[in-house]
Amino acid sequence: MSKVSAEGIREPWSERLRRLLDALEERWRPDVVLIDSRAGIDEVASACLTDLSATMILLFAIDGDQT
């Protein structure tokens, strides 16, 4: 999902998410960033899987009473 800025620059969702994470890193220096993507593979999940991480850990859960 791309967004076009007022200047006419098209920026993909993954680039916007990368800018947000870079800003968080610069300001807060977190050890870990957790991104919740419960609904399956959507824009957030696909950006995380393909564009963002050098090191990634995927967590899965079974649909049950405790999830």
Image (cartoon, helix red, strand yellow):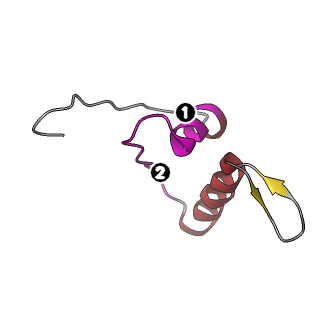
Q: Nearer the viewer, residue 20 or 24?
A: 20
Q: Earlier along the polypeptide chain: callout 1 or callout 2?
A: 2
Q: Residue at x 69, y 58 (%)?
A: 19
Task: Tell me: 59 left or right of 14.
Answer: left
Q: Position of residue 3 (x, y in %)?
A: 74, 57
Query: Could you give the CA–CA distance between mark 1 and mark 2, rounded to whole angstroms?
Result: 11 Å
Q: Residue at x 63, y 32 (%)?
A: 50
For label 2, the SS is loop
Tell me the kind of residue under disc 1: Thr
| Region of the chain picked out in magenta, as a range | 30-50
- On whether residue 38 falls in the magenta region, the answer is yes
Q: Residue at x 41, y 31 (%)?
A: 58
Residue matched to label 1: 55
Q: Nearer the viewer, residue 54 or 10?
A: 10
Q: Which mark is residue 33?
A: 2
Decide: few, some or many residues near mark 2? Use Cα within 10 Å; few <14, some 14-19, many ≥20: few
Q: Position of residue 36 (x, y in %)?
A: 40, 47
